[in-house]
Image: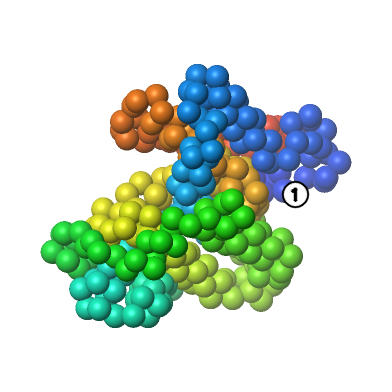
């Protein structure tokens, strides 16, 4: 990772005029994922008649909601040069907590949702403490949370699922607003808010600066540890929000909820143009990546393939996205050498 990080830093240090010499450097980072999405939509439009049906588009919008929420948060983490592979397990844990409180214990739905968000935030805070305070690599810290949260989900209700989810929550997941599923609107609000914060506020600039040059950020007076802890805590809360939507859509709380969500979110972020090395980020690209991943999964399902094939497609997409980013970094490093 150090070689890629050095290449990324050299690319950022290059004067803007030199960086834009090649035609690919003049294209926005979202171009690649946009092309892939257009090709996928055109192909499925001709090969799968049901793909263009309104009900299928509604299904894609609903399926994109949870991943869109998680991917928005994951964009911030990857922008700092970190990674979080625990979000899927945290979704499972929060889903069981929501079901246990609202159904088994009979708590108010709103209080159950607030506690669900709090549990997610607590998981994120633990990740942040392990990474920022203890000094663990993000992949190790979140791997530990990945295992702990999934185990916790299995323990909440002895490994069983919880049905009879409150009707108000289930009905919300089935309603539309202005022709768009309500759960998709939540994802849109999260994404737009994330984009505004990232591009229009000092907090967003701190996130990008942290990923671009951590030591320089520290030397300039930025509380790097606090920023990291806040980011991971916020992403944990977003995992709790995704759990609410998952539980509402499924009308049940299951310990296996959120399985592979972390892979889909990371794939969407990297496919959308946010480099795995950090320092740059694009929420628009992330959302295009989420839609692309969901469309690919939908196409595999329409073709009659099982979930294993869907995961294979997502895995291949992630590998391609990472390799494309490595190629871009090599091109940037070559441009620096030529300019020098």
> Is any atom of residue 111 visible in this view?
yes
Residue 123 versus residue 160: which sits nearer the camera?
160
Q: What residue is shown at x 79% (from left), y 29% (from top)?
A: 23
State whether residue 50 is above or below residue 318: above
Above or below, 133 against 241 in this view is: below
Report the residue at 47% width, 49% height from top: 62
Give the x, y percent position of residue 227.
Answer: 56, 71
Q: Residue furthest left?
A: 158
Label 1 neighbour load within 10 Å: few <14, some 14-19, many 20+: few
Disc 1 target residue = 13
**Residue toward you, 8 or 237:** 237
Relative placement, left or right, of 133 versus 228 is: left
Q: Is residue 317 visible?
A: no
Q: Position of residue 250 (x, y in %)?
A: 33, 54
Query: Looking at the rendering, in which quadrant would you find the C terminus?
Result: top right
- Residue located at (48% from left, 23% from top): 48
Dividing the picture into quarters, in which one does residue 112 lie?
A: bottom left
Who is closer to the viewer here, 59 or 212? 59
The image quarter containing residue 159 is bottom left
Q: Which element type, helix, strand or loop, lies under badge 1? A: helix
Residue 218 appears left or right of 100: right
- Identify the residue shown where x is 28% and y is 58%: 252
Counting from the top left corner in percent of width and height, residue 102 is at 29, 74
Q: Quadrant of residue 289?
A: top right
* x and y percentages locating residue 188 in the rendered image: 59, 57
**Residue ranking furthest to the top:** 47
């Amino acid at each position: 990772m150090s070689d890629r990080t050095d290449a990324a830093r050299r690319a950022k240090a290059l004067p803007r005029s030199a960086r834009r010499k090649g035609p690919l450097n003049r294209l926005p980072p979202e171009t690649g994922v946009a092309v892939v999405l257009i090709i996928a939509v055109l192909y499925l439009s001709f090969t799968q008649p049901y793909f263009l049906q309104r009900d299928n588009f509604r299904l894609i919008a609903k399926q994109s909601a949870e991943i869109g929420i998680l991917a928005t948060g994951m964009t911030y983490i990857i922008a700092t040069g970190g990674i979080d592979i625990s979000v899927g397990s945290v979704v499972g844990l929060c889903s069981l907590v929501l079901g246990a409180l609202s159904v088994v214990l009979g708590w108010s739905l709103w209080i159950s949702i607030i506690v669900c968000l709090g549990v997610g935030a607590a998981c994120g805070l633990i990740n942040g403490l392990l990474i920022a305070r203890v000094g663990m690599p993000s992949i190790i810290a979140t791997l530990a949370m990945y295992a702990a949260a999934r185990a916790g989900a299995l323990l909440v209700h002895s490994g069983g699922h919880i049905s009879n989810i409150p009707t108000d929550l289930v009905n919300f997941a089935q309603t539309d607003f202005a022709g768009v599923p309500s759960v998709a609107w939540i994802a849109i609000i999260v994404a737009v808010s994330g984009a505004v914060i990232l591009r229009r506020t000092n907090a967003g600039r701190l996130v990008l600066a942290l990923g671009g040059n951590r030591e320089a950020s520290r030397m300039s007076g930025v509380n790097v540890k606090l920023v990291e802890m806040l980011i991971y805590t916020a992403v944990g809360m977003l995992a709790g929000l995704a759990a609410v939507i998952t539980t509402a859509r499924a009308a049940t709380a299951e310990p296996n909820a959120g399985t592979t969500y972390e892979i889909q979110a990371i794939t969407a972020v990297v496919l959308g143009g946010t480099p795995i090395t950090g320092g740059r980020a694009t929420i628009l690209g992330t959302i295009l990546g989420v839609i692309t991943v969901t469309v690919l999964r939908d196409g595999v399902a329409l073709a009659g393939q099982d979930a294993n094939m869907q995961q294979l497609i997502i895995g291949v997409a992630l590998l391609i996205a990472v390799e494309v980013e490595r190629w871009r970094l090599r091109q940037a490093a070559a441009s620096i050498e030529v300019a020098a």
